[in-house]
Amino acid sequence: MELRQVNKPYHTDHSIVYSCQYHVLFCPKYRRQVLTDAVAARMKELVLAKQADYG
């Protein structure tokens, strides 16, 4: 799954420059796998739909 935006703009505010991006972590009890089969497929659909909304 590729979610990178090559032309993601940088924002400036006084003395800082930033580009807001997200990194999602799941830390379930006992380190069990969370995103498996149907859950992983649905999560991918939701993330790609939201990415399309934001362009």
Image (cartoon, rainbow, N blue to C red):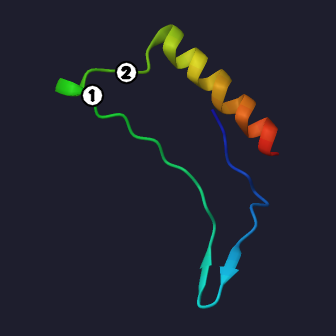
Residue at left offset 65%, top offset 25% = 46
Image location of residue 33, percent across then percent down:
33, 21
Observer-nearest of 43 and 4: 43
Image location of residue 52, percent across then percent down:
80, 36
| Label annotation for residue 34 | 2
Q: Amino acid at mark 2?
A: Val
The crowd level at tag 1 (other Cα within 10 Å; few <14, some 14-19, many 20+) is: few
Left or right: 32 in relation to 35: left
| Label annotation for residue 28 | 1
Farthest residue toward the top?
38
Q: Amino acid at mark 1?
A: Pro
Farthest residue toward the bottom?
15
How many angstroms separate mark 2 from mark 1 (CA)? 7 Å
Residue at left offset 68%, top offset 48% = 4
Which image quarter: residue 43?
A: top right
Against 19, residue 45 (above or below) is above
Which image quadrant: the C terminus? top right
Image location of residue 26, percent across then percent down:
36, 34
Which image quarter: residue 51?
A: top right
Q: Which numbered disc flags the more N-terminal residue, 2 or 1?
A: 1
Residue at left offset 50%, top offset 14% = 39
Farthest residue toward the left?
30
The crowd level at tag 2 (other Cα within 10 Å; few <14, some 14-19, many 20+) is: few
Image location of residue 19, percent across then percent down:
63, 67
Q: Are marks 2 and 1 in contact (CB under 8 Å)?
A: yes
Q: In terms of secondary structure, where does tag 2 sit? A: loop
Left or right: 46 in relation to 28: right
